[in-house]
Amino acid sequence: MPGKAVIVGWAHTPFGKLDALDIETLVRGVVNEALAHAQVAAADVGHVALGVYNHGFQPQGFEAGLISLCHPDLRFTPAVHVENACATGSAAVHSAMDAIESGRVRIALAVGAEKMTGVPPAAIADILLTGCYRREEETPQGFAGIFGQIAQTYFDRYGNRSEELAMIAAKNHANAVDNPYAHVRKDMGFAFCNEVSEKNPLVAGPLRRTDCSMVSDGAAALVLADEDTARALARAIRFRARVQVNDLMPLSRRDPVAFEGAHRAWQAALAQAGVGIDDLDLVETHDCFTIAEMLEYEAMGLAPRGEGWRVIRDGVSCKGGRVPVNVSGGLKARGHPLGATGVSMHVMAAMQLAGEAGAMQLPGAALAGLFNMGGAAVANYVSILERSQ
């Protein structure tokens, strides 16, 4: 029987405005660094899944063809390009795992990358709307406009929670100070995040600039192997669970603040892993906007519907809290290069479990959860990870 896939190595570029690096350079760098970290030869890789969203961010298409340029021994290795909106990176992880768990290969690579900063802001807003149901969900503010509407719906139903959104932003920026890969390593403080100002203007609806993740470049990679192969390697991070649940794409056909697909993914993953949400030592969640993190508190079961704001207000999701969330700074401060994000989240969690997280390290981290979504909770991925060696 084929063995389960485990993480045996990784690599991660800094996220940010990386003017000197194109998509090919980003991919090549993390592929070779990840192989070195795992102590795996390129010739032993049997499958590569490369996640890049693109849709006009850069002119190079057929991104899977770039893998052949990363190392001479990858010239004839099967490689595929995958895309699932902001969950593209997790789609790449699942593709690599499927190749191993089908028994076809013993070692696979999951790579995520995006070059977003090379086009004008108006083009960025338009490209991001390709992750929405464009027949109905066109806004001049792009994806921020969609989540601004979601935030306003939440406020209309449950009260103005701008202060709690500012608390989430401040928490994640403070956490990112310790992350050498983060786009912004600056503690913004609650007062700045909470105030509408020239430096922190309203972007869409009630969302301020500090409520929105940045436009970032970057890449990340995972080396995965079957359990037998991993026994001869330095580390192995096991998947206690991995789940994907999709929901209706149009927000008009579902409750936009319920994130039901995300809730179902979390329920299934926790059941598969045989744990509860409070058993997790940390969670990396998809805070493309602070309202998303608040809604995800409810989806993962940290609070009942309509009470996600209590999680940050009570310090549950802070370092030292019951379930620390986004110790890496999250998408809000670490950055959100679309294709790289899901892979990056797995790297951040694996680093904690392996005790290799440096200044970010949480003492005794043994069980981690992560949630990565495509669109407004349309493609929902949950992984629960633990160290097996």
Image (cartoon, rainbow, N blue to C red):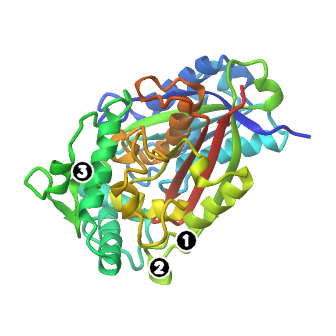
Give percent across and percent down for residue 211. Answer: 27, 56
Give percent across and percent down for residue 304. Answer: 49, 69
Q: Residues within 10 Å of mark 2 (few under 14, many from 20)?
A: few
Q: Which of the marked residues, 1 or 2, is nearer the chain's N terminus?
A: 2
Residue furthest to the bottom in view is 253
Res. 81 visible in picture? no
Give the number of the mark in front: 1 or 3: 1
Instruction: Give the SS element for disc 1.
Output: helix
Quadrant of res 264: bottom right
Instruction: Return the mark for residue 120.
Output: 3
Looking at the rendering, in which quadrant would you find the N terminus? top right
Give the number of the mark in front: 3 or 2: 2
Measure how far apart labels 3 and 2 are at the Cα level.
Answer: 33 Å
Measure how far apart labels 1 and 3 are at the Cα level.
Answer: 34 Å
130 on left or right of 73:
left
Residue beneath disc 1: 260
Residue beneath disc 2: 255
> Disc 2 marks which amino acid?
Asp
17 on left or right of 8:
left
> Disc 3 marks which amino acid?
Pro
Looking at the rendering, in which quadrant would you find the C terminus? top right
Q: Residue at x 57, y 71 (%)?
A: 247
